[in-house]
Image (cartoon, grey):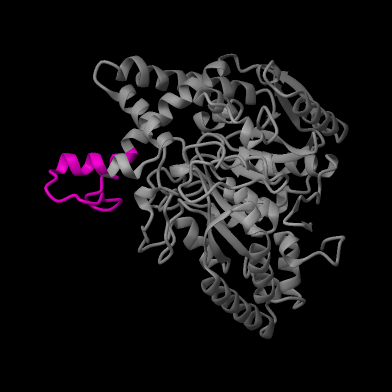
Amino acid sequence: MSDNINARLCHMTLHELHDMLAQGQVSSREITSDVLARIDEVEASVGAYVTVDREGALSGADAADAAIARARRVGDAAEIGAVVGIPVVLKDNVCTRGMRTTCCSKMLEDFVPTYDAAVTARLRAAGAVIVGKANMDEFAMGSTTQTSIFHVTRNPWDPERVPGGSSGGCAAAVAAGEAVAAVGSDTGGSVRQPASFCGVVGLKPTYGRVSRYGVAAFASSLDTVGPVTQDVRDCAIMLNVMAGHDERDSTSAPNAVPDYTEYVERGVEGLKIGIPKEFFGPGMDEGVRTAVERAVHALEGAGAKIVDVSIPLVEHALGVYYLVATAEASSNMARLDGIRYGHRPEGRSGMDVADLMSASRGQGFGMEVKRRIMLGTFVLSAGNIDAFYGRALRSRRLLKEDVERALAQCDCLASPTAPTVAFRFDEEPDDPLAMYLQDIYTTLANLAGVPAISVPCGFADGLPVGLQIMGRMFDEGTLMQVARAVELTSGFDRARPEVGGCVK
């Protein structure tokens, strides 16, 4: 339970609300109604949503309340599922049957899937309440949630600042109390960086741990699906529901899924935490450096052993990432041609197929998506594929080996999540390459396929700072241990922004 018994329901954690539901202290309809009221209060200031399904959410809440009542009548209250009746928002690239899934692009502006993504189906089966779809950078390509065709999302800590991206709507919604938890996607830091900017927890699981079935592809060998939550225990609960093998996803791992909540309160006594020296060089804001170093010292004080490690090739990670990611994006975006589905231009009579496809893609995609498609097409073109894409794949293998060698010396690695705190909209770099540097600490985990989590570790200039913890493949449990220890020692626990004139 929260130590603030007067806290609004929409500001409570998932596990607090679950306990209240199980004890009959509150209903899912009351929780969902409060979340919807919060959306009404602050959405004009935040812009976290592109679709709010009020009727569906309340209907789902009533179904959850009926299921909870049945369990209580037969004396099985202890068996009430961990996310039953909990309002959750999904990033708008996660398919939802009967609810539009646009990827925040004109290309899919009116697309309504006929099926649920695997993660959507798992959450529905577990009794979660799907409130709606969160704003995002178009096709998950961006770091600010400004490339959406609908509107920009603003950071709840300061509406003049970006929330990060591409899962900025998810992070902003959870931070502002517009959802109890969220599901985002992470291709190069798209869950972790906005989690850092918005002061929430964001996890990129091991590649293959969570099914990608029904999630619009950006870069298929890098894409992962992960939770965004208020605290680490909530993150563990969400991963318990989301993880598991799915035969519809050929990259889905068959590995058994442990109960991640069992790791949360284990502490860090005896754990070795590696500090990659390459991640603490120039380019990091001093306020971020101070907060991260303070968090590392606190972990040492809690019993962890801090060891220095090296990832010599990490300076090449960003270049390798943008070659691999854009090449795969070019391939994946090729299916969006305006023929089978997607945007079709006006006045298309008389167009041949090539002209129709060109007009559809020219009008349907925004500038950042076009930029990445063009770069990826160049990388894959005859005469360039081996020099660029082939070399990038070989370099990726060497980077993965570097990460494995570093993790052989410790249990996990710690670094900043992002080199800065959330920047102002008017401070956004004009140079796309400068914007890509926001991913400098996060892309490595995607290239190596390992799990990584961002947890708030303090403040710089009054804005949240995230600590990234990266671990061995399928060892998300250790990340939960360390992240919870950070939560307990950072002074950030239960900190909330003011937004819409309402203090959390």
Residue 49: x %, y % from top left: 55, 56
Report the span colored magenta.
Answer: 332-359
Q: Which of 51 and 244 is in front in this view?
A: 51
Q: Which of the 4 image quadrants contains residue 22?
A: bottom right
Is residue 98 visible to the viewer in this orientation of the structure?
yes
Is residue 238 found inside the magenta-colored segment of the image? Answer: no
Q: Look at 58% across and 42% down and name the residue there.
A: 191
Is residue 261 visible to the viewer in this orientation of the structure?
no
Q: How many marks?
A: 0
Q: Look at 27% across and 53% down and name the residue there.
A: 341
Residue 10: x %, y % from top left: 71, 64
Q: What is the quadrant of the C terminus in the image?
A: bottom right
Q: Look at 59% across and 14% down and name the residue there.
A: 312
Q: Which of the 4 image quadrants contains residue 313?
A: top right
Q: Look at 56% across and 45% down and name the residue there.
A: 167
Residue 265: x %, y % from top left: 78, 48
Main SS of the magenta part reads loop
Residue 129: x %, y % from top left: 57, 67
Q: What is the quadrant of the N terminus in the image?
A: bottom right
Q: Which of the 4 image quadrants contains residue 283?
A: top right
Q: In this view, does 374 lie to the left or right of 17?
A: left
**Of all residues shown, which one is farthest toward the bottom?**
73
Is residue 337 found inside the magenta-colored segment of the image? Answer: yes
Q: Which of 76 and 135 is in front in this view?
A: 135
Q: In this view, does 435 lie to the left or right of 457?
A: left
Where is 379 relative to 23, above or below?
Answer: above
Q: In this view, does 69 lie to the left or right of 165?
A: right
